[in-house]
Image (cartoon, helix red, strand yellow):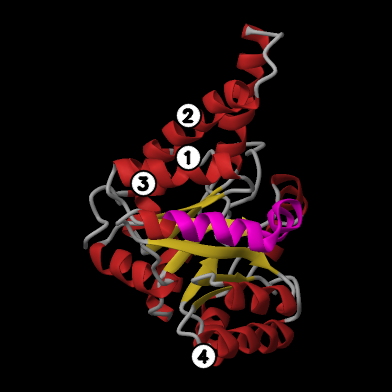
Amino acid sequence: MTAKLQTVLRQAQKGRYAVGAFNISDLEQAQAVVRAAVALHAPVIINTSEKAIAYAGLEELAAFVLAMAKKYPIPIVLTLDHGHELRLARACVDRGYTGIMFDASRLPFRQNVRRTAAIVRYAHRRQIGVEGELGQVKYPSEIAQDRRLVLTDPTQAHTFVRLTKVDAFAVAIGNAHGVPQAREHLDFTLLAQIKKMIDVPLVLHGASGTPPAMIRRAIHFGIAKINIDTDLRLAFSQALRRELRRDAHEFDPRGLLGPSRDAVMATVKKKIVLFGSRNKSKS
């Protein structure tokens, strides 16, 4: 069943677990994520980035994800991930998305507030929740150059949430997109300060490769949504390479991509268990 972003995150916040938000860009990945969540009776968030939408098409992505949401009894949220353009964010709302992650974090604070508040007003007319971001979740190479630029300021976070009226807030506490280049360090002292300043559910981006102990501690400190992308790409591509090595003459896409779908499904199941959202589809 389709579910609203703000609904599943408030339930996670109350239940002290996190909902997995998994990035997809094609049918195989979408099926893998949904089937894993169905098997474990877990709520799930399907993320589609701007690049994924450009690759697969907005109408096509929305159609097959929403079709699966109608088919299965678990809460399924379809969300734009790291939307930068207001036009696309509005189009996603109009197409039936049930959550928007709008990212204007690279803009000056006032511009970030203004643009994020604009999409919040638009989405809230349809009772659709919006996640905003302050601070910048970058790639490891960027963090190495200047760590100070990427962390969320707790006082600014409070002001940002109050002015924009976002339903969820993405933190920058040392997390990074992509494959970690070095030992990742999450600033849990900063996370605790942010949690004290705002009451909306908190979101951790760039969680692929983060050690399980850190994930559990982040959930303890209030993280209610965890984004996973790179781990799924790695599972998919590694399985595909294995299949090509196993049978270089295989030409049926189903034979080639089926193992990749299974690998993504197995990865998602592990994340769901780690996040504590197993058997929470009715909570």
Q: Nearer the viewer, residue 168 or 35?
A: 35
The residue shown at (64%, 49%) is 177
Tell me which numbered mark, 3 or 4, is placed earlier along the sequence: 3
Q: Where the C terminus falls, by quadrant? A: bottom left
**Eyeballing the image, is 154 above or below 142?**
below
Would you name the residue on which mark 1 appears? Answer: 32
Alpha carbon of mark 3 to alpha carbon of mark 4: how far?
29 Å
**Eyeballing the image, is 217 above or below 270?**
below
The dot on residue 262 is: 2
Q: Amino acid at mark 3?
A: Ala
Magenta-highlighted residues: 49-68
Q: Is residue 200 left or right of residue 283?
A: right
Q: Is residue 96 left or right of residue 119?
A: left
Q: Name the spot of residue 242 as percent of width and height, x first.
A: 61, 15
Tell me which numbered mark, 2 or 3, is placed earlier along the sequence: 3
Alpha carbon of mark 2 to alpha carbon of mark 4: how far?
38 Å
Alpha carbon of mark 2 to alpha carbon of mark 1: how far?
7 Å
* Mark 2 vs 1: CB contact within 8 A: yes
Instruction: Mark 3: give few (<14), some (14-19) or many (20+) Cα within 10 Å.
Output: many
Figure quadrant of residue 274: top left
Would you name the residue on which mark 4 appears? Answer: 125
Q: Amino acid at mark 2?
A: Asp
The residue shown at (51%, 90%) is 125
The residue shown at (69%, 53%) is 52
Tell me which numbered mark, 1 or 3, is placed earlier along the sequence: 1
Q: Nearer the viewer, residue 175 or 207?
A: 207
Secondary structure of the residue carrying tag 2 is: helix
